[in-house]
Structures are given as C-alpha cells and as structure tokens.
Image (spheres, rainbow, N blue to C red):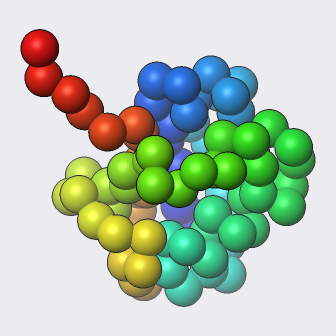
Amino acid sequence: MIDVVYFAWVRERIGKPRETIETGAETVAELVAELTVREARYEAAFADRSAIRVAVDQVLSDFDAPLSGVREVAFFPPMTGG
C-alpha cells in the first residue's frame, strides 16, 4: 500500500488531497499510468507531466524513481518564488 498525496491544482483536478492505494507499479511513471486509466479526472491531472513534480517519501524525485519500499508519493506543481 502506498499513500498518494496531491497538492494545489493537482488536488483540485483529482478532487481529493490523498488516497491509499494498492499498486503493482515498480516506478512512479508506472503508478501514474495506473492512475490515468482509472478515471478522466486522473488523466486530466497528469496530462502534462512536465508541469508536475514528484516526491518519494518526501524527497524530490523523478518519474523513473523506483517504488520498492516506498510509503508515500506526492504530486505537486513546480514551486516558484516571489
């Protein structure tokens, strides 16, 4: 089981802040692929992956990051200063 957390507009498009899922995905990219076939709202949220950052167990990662032993994956838009 992995906790999946969504922030900002990713959360708004999916309609929930977090969920716990059972997955056979081996990488973040495979997890995203599983999510996008669930419902149109996931597909819309992940349509432009270049606009999304990912953290694995609270460490900034890439979509090719492995999920073995991971407890949490978070998706959020890039941060900007100001």
Say how many tags the image has: 0
Q: State whether residue 26 appears in this view.
A: yes
Q: Identify which residue, 55 or 52, lies in the foreground.
A: 52
In the image shown, does 11 or 57 lie closer to the viewer? 11
> Which residue is painted at 40% across and 62% down in the image?
71
Which x, y percent locates residue 48?
59, 51
Q: Is residue 55 above or below residue 22?
A: above
The residue at the point 67 percent across, 81 percent down is: 24
Q: Residue at x 50, y 71 (%)?
A: 28
State whether residue 67 appears in this view.
no
Image quadrant holding the N terminus, namely bottom right
Image coords of residue 46 (percent x, y): 63, 50
Tell me if 75 is positioned left or right of 80 in this view: right
* Relative height, residue 46 to residue 77 (above, below): below
Give the farthest residue toward the left: 82
The residue at the point 40 percent across, 37 percent down is 77
Question: Where's residue 63, x and y in %?
Answer: 43, 70
Is residue 35 left or right of 6 when viewed as pictured?
Answer: right
Considering the image in quadrants, where does the C terminus appear? top left
- The answer to which image quadrant residue 80 occupies is top left
Q: Position of residue 29 (x, y in %)?
A: 55, 73
